[in-house]
Amino acid sequence: MIPAERPKVPRTPPEPLWREASDVLALTPRLWRIHRTRGAHVVAWNVLRSYGPLPSMRYDPHPEPVGEHRVGVLYAASSLATALAETFQATRLIDTISFGPQLTVWQPIRALRLLDLTGTWALRNQAAHALDAAPRSVGRAWARTIAATWPDLDGLWVASTMTGEANAVLWSPAADALPGAPEFSRPLADPTLYAIIARIAATELAYGVD
């Protein structure tokens, strides 16, 4: 009898998870975030979202059911192109108007301790690099288990499923690493920034711009 194939990424993470010292990166990257300034659920650029888990997000660490929790999450990209690709992936149209989108760039004030999911950690824990592209509910289950197993982590360092570049997923322990003021913050509709976005959209992303 031929044994059934094991899924590349189990829906339930194995326990216990394990890691080597080299799996945890100490990083102070420049991070890029596009966030809303109008409409419902506006959160400041340097405040972690405590409401969750959201079905549309992959690595929310919040427990079920959806609601306000004592844990938070903040997603940021390592480049403007990735921030744009991730934020507007559903429509591939960069909306610079409707929800008052703002681009904010900053660096953490201390090194972030991030579990590196761009390497072989997932493979060594009975999953695969495909964790980044698994159903989002699976990613959230892994996030909850990782956060519970290692409360010392500030979050995850993951590959964008859109560009392949790195994204940071920051959890509650990272709150004290966010600066009080950013390096840069402008509306996407700012004329100079809009021109940069239009160039990136045309040459790197094949996205439209509104």
Image (cartoon, rainbow, N blue to C red):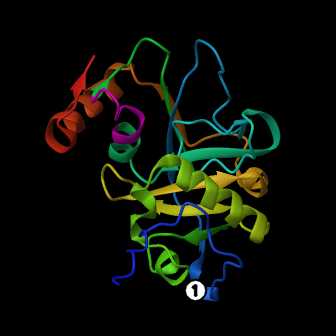
Answer whether residue 110 is visible to the viewer in this image.
no
In this view, the residue farthest toward the front is 1
> Picture coordinates of residue 2 (x, y %)?
33, 83
Q: Amino acid at mark 1?
A: Ser
Q: Which image quarter holds the C terminus?
A: top left
Q: Mark 1 sits on what residue?
A: 22
The residue sitting at 64% across, 83% down in the picture is 19
Between 184 and 58, the residue placed more toward the observer is 58
Above or below, 182 against 185 in this view is: below
Q: Around disc 1, counting alpha carbons within 10 Å, would you say few (fewer than 14), some (14 to 19), or many (20 or more)?
A: few
Q: Which image quarter holds the N terminus?
A: bottom left
The residue sitting at 56% across, 46% down in the picture is 75
Answer whether residue 118 is visible to the viewer in this image.
yes
**Residue 135, magenta (yes or no):** no
Query: Relative to 13, is 176 on the left or the right?
Result: right
Between 171 and 46, the residue placed more toward the observer is 171
Query: Relative to 52, is 165 on the left or the right?
Result: left
Q: What is the chief secondary structure element of the magenta stretch?
A: loop
Above or below, 40 against 59 in this view is: above
The residue sitting at 75% across, 46% down in the picture is 63
**Residue 91, magenta (yes or no):** yes
Determine whether the residue tagged by mark 1 lies in a helix, strand or loop.
helix
Magenta part of the chain? 85-92
The residue sitting at 63% across, 14% down in the picture is 40
> Picture coordinates of residue 13 (x, y %)?
61, 68
> Picture coordinates of residue 31 (x, y %)?
52, 50
Above or below, 12 against 140 in this view is: below
